Image (cartoon, rainbow, N blue to C red):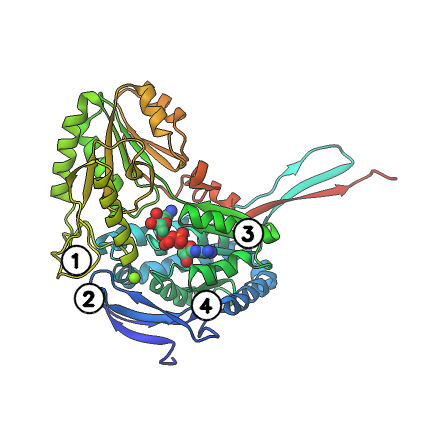
Amino acid sequence: MSSDLFVELAAPNGRKYSQPRGLFINNEFVKSKSGETLSSINPSDEKEIASVYAAGPEDVDVAVAAARKAFKDPSWRDMDTNARADLLYKFAELIEQHKETLATIETWDNGKPYSVSLNDDLGEVVGTIMYYAGYANKIHGQVIDTSPAKLAYTVREPLGVCGQIIPWNFPLAMAAWKLGPALCTGNTVVLKAAEQTPLSILYLGTLVKEAGFPPGVVNFINGEGRKAGAALAQHLDVDKIAFTGSTQTGKEIMKMAAVNMKNITLETGGKSPLVVFDDCDLDQAVKWAHVGIMYNQGQVCTATSRILVQEGVYDKFVAGFKDYVSQTSVVGDPFKDDTFQGPQVTKTQFERVLSYIESGKSEGAELVSGGESYKDVGGKGFFISPTIFTNVKDNMKIYREEVFGPFVVISSFKTEEEAVERANDTTYGLGAALFTQDITRGHRVARHIEAGMVWINSSNDSDIRIPFGGVKQSGIGRELGEAGLEAYTNRKAIHVNLGNKL
Ligand code: NAI
Ligand code: MG
């Protein structure tokens, strides 16, 4: 191992491992052509963990060429689908074996509590790869009867070289959501990790190689969004772009992808409502509302960040919620067992949340909890006290814009009609939660809400088997479930003339 392409690290929890630093192309780690690097910061103490090579457009070219070659190579193109399934199962098994190391890297680089990394993120990664491994040998076309003079059938083909751009809030899980369906359908991949969390994906690269994927099938690069990400989105030899991140960047990617009419899947932002009706189980509503916004430091695209409570239970809800947040949202070192909330991922995100706190105060909303940085974790790090604003008006910035932090706004409503109208009064449409004991109302409101996902009596219930995605400016297309396969296959129609003579 060249010492420059790997660095031996010891994480804060004592775990030692060898961290790759290169771009993972053709199953090998290589330096970027320019030699440029980016540095990965531990958000708990603001120190550098390591630096990794950052791709420029010239490196993207190399990765895309590798993926194109692999896509055409019989070793991958013509692989028996049982063998493809086995390969994905083997990959999942290796991730399971290395999950403590992967979870350690994730927590160190991202700041999420270790128990969350290990149980939720790594559980999701293994589960998703296993789920799509199961689909590898179940991708079918159809025979379509027309007349005896013709045989017509469809085959489901991979799209080709897929560019995948992932965010920093769930680095490995977002990689798995994109790798699983792309690979089980026979595509090849160039995946770019977010510059804020570049480390775990490189370790995953070592497992791609060990699992036995042919070189070039899976390529991982790091690099700046505006350089490496844009090069991928604009590349003429990339057939598809799948993106998770901000709505603004999603729109830019859509434009760039138009250059060769790439197939696109976008999963972007949200300001998802959580609607509490008078007749609900209030204790349950309080608990789900808490996890719905405070989980993962509030850095969740589907976070139910806008709580609407019916007048009759408004005061009780606010008091109960405030109490529950103060008891449960323990802020601290993410490697400590009792920590519920670690630091925000970067200084930029930390400052962004603080700026929304200022905005909420200046617009006249009532701050009932938090509203400041949290200094009790060694005086360093991007920690924020869980923040609750009440008396929030619909025209306030904090009511309308995605904050992406442990930050929630609460407002009251009178009628079901008003609740639906205000829940839908947003440019976003990702998730929505509602709490009621009236099943008729529950289903009725679920139908009227403009969102890709609705949770009745829960929040942020994501399931590998169930489609995930948004409407309006929350995205295009679906990930997960059987629906996730649609994003990675074409249906080719083959017409066979059995007797029509000219
Ligand atoms: P971003 O959307 O800019 O970054 C996400 C990914 O896109 C990263 O890999 C980045 O390198 C890449 N990227 C950035 N600009 C690009 C470009 N011009 N072309 C191609 N790729 C590009 O998000 P950012 O700046 O990290 O976070 C800003 C806000 O976005 C957050 O505060 C949050 O509101 C939202 N966000 C939403 C996420 C979600 O899960 N839906 C995840 C991350 C951020
Ligand atoms: Mg970091």
The response on whether ligand 2 sits within 8 Å of label 2 is no
The quadrant of the rendering that contains the N terminus is: bottom left
Q: Distance between the residues labelled 4 and 1?
A: 32 Å
Name the residue at the bottom extreme.
2
Closer to viewer: mark 1 or mark 2: 1
Instruction: Give the percent coordinates (x, y) of residue 28.
Output: 46, 72
Going from N to C along the chain, the mark reached first, 4 or 3, is: 4
Residue bearing mark 1: 333
Instruction: Give the percent coordinates (x, y) of residue 501.
Output: 86, 39
Asked whether residue 133 is in view, the answer is: no
**Left or right: 500, with 221 as reference point:** right
Tell me, yes or no, whether the two marked residues, 2 and 3, touch with CB atoms within 8 Å.
no
Residue bearing mark 2: 12
Asked whether residue 50 is in view, the answer is: yes
Instruction: Give the percent coordinates (x, y) of residue 370.
Output: 16, 44
Going from N to C along the chain, the mark reached first, 1 or 2, is: 2
Place residue 140 in its image quadrant. Answer: top right
The response on whether ligand 1 sits within 8 Å of label 4 is no
- Vertical side of 469 occupied by 349: above or below: below
Residue bearing mark 3: 257
Q: Is mark 4 on a helix, strand or loop?
A: loop
